[in-house]
Amino acid sequence: MAGGVGVRFWPYSRNAKPKQYLDILGTGRSLLQATFDRFAPMCPVENIYVVTNQEHYDITREQLPELGANQILAEPMRKNTAPCIAYASWYIKSKNPDAVIVVSPSDHLILNEQQFRDTVAKAIEQARNQNCLITMGIRPTRPETGYGYIQYHQEKTPVKKVKTFTEKPELSIAKKFLESGDFVWNSGIFIWSVDAITEALKKFTPEIAEAFEDMEKHFGQTDEKKALENTYAQCKNISIDFGVMEKADNVYVIEANFPWSDLGSWGSLHEASIKDGDQNHVEGMVKTYDTRNCFIKGQQDKMMVIQGLNGYLIGWFDDVLIVCEKDREELFRKYVNDLKSNPDATKFL
């Protein structure tokens, strides 16, 4: 899934090049390319599909030349993850009705990738043999309030029945979850057979399922693009978690212990980045004084001198200079919305 716009990563993430197309970790590969690299050892390249917005079709092909044109599924509009997953599921079903699908966001950080692949393999085996919807849960390392949580039944099998979902709890609740030992973070990575997910979509989001069942006969035809626009127009904006996972009774979780981050905000990127003794991440020509816990992105040809800040994002991003509290995620949406309302400022989006 590569259709997001990365609002919380503005001004680094822009409309023309959202965060999944950026090398934000300085590895030489974008987050999308890193996701492709993660799956390539365990999945034939011809079986890898990217769902993105149609405006990012060209940059997706540019970054992943290994994929054929028919492996990039271009959404005509953004309708959240349920329509995105439905599109990919019915498309894959038209190619292979016995497929097992792994759904992964394109913008996550995963360390120890072999352990990730081993976990996925166990889940695939379960999904192939059982009509179930499996989500990957990450063993929590702190009482994080920015992630969703999954509570599971205490079972000795690697794949456990899910008891409850909780979205972004208050700190006091997150601490209790951590202490209980039967909660994991919801990673947003799913494993299921194509039959299991299409049947679940039919049951819990029938209007989306009906639209894509009608769409199936248009795949590969000359009217595919127009038919897809009509299909998306019929879909409501809804996440797969709210639309299906929180309602189905055949939902399971497989626990993973590898280091993971959804890189959903500047705060999470700061946490995942290399830092100095004052917990600052610094790039470019920068001098700091009495400054702590900051993410600082400078330039090689401009000097930045920063004094007396704690917990800030300070950075030059092309034509935008930003200085703000890095952990105030809600402010980034406000910045973007304010720019949208100013015709002279939309060029900075």
Image: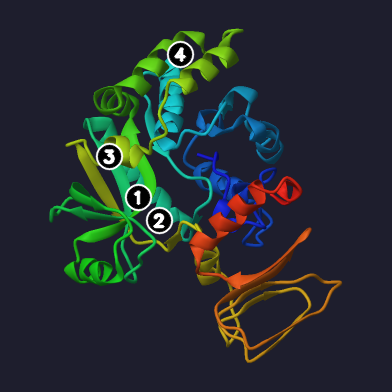
Q: Which residue is mark 2?
A: 115
Q: CA distance from mark 1 to mark 3?
A: 20 Å
Image quadrant where residue 313 sits: bottom right
Callout 1 amino acid: Thr
Residue in view at x 50 percent, y 71 percent: 271
The x, y position of residue 59, in whole percent, is 69, 38
Query: Which colour scheme appears in the figure?
Result: rainbow
Residue that appears at 20% across and 55% down: 151
| Marks 1 & 2, CB-CB < 8 Å contact | yes
Q: Residue at x 33, y 55 (%)?
A: 148
* Relative to 285, residue 339 above or below: above
Q: Helix or strand or loop: what does disc 2 sit on?
A: helix
Which label number is shown at residue 245?
3
- Who comes first in sequence, dot 4 or dot 3? 4
Q: Report the Cα–Cα distance between label 4 and label 2.
A: 37 Å
Most extreme residue toward the bottom is 290
Q: Earlier in the sequence, mark 4 or mark 2?
A: 2
Near mark 4 (Cα within 10 A), the count class, few <14, some 14-19 or many ≥20, is: many
Mark nearest the camera among 2 and 3 is 3
- The answer to whether the residue labelled 2 contacts the one labelled 3, judged by CB atoms less than 8 Å apart, is no
User: Left or right: 347 with respect to 262?
Assistant: right
Closer to the camera, 183 or 66?
183
Q: Which labelled disc corresponds to residue 312?
A: none
Give amino acid for label 2: Gln
Residue farthest toward the right in the current orientation of the protein: 301
The disc placed on residue 215 is: 4
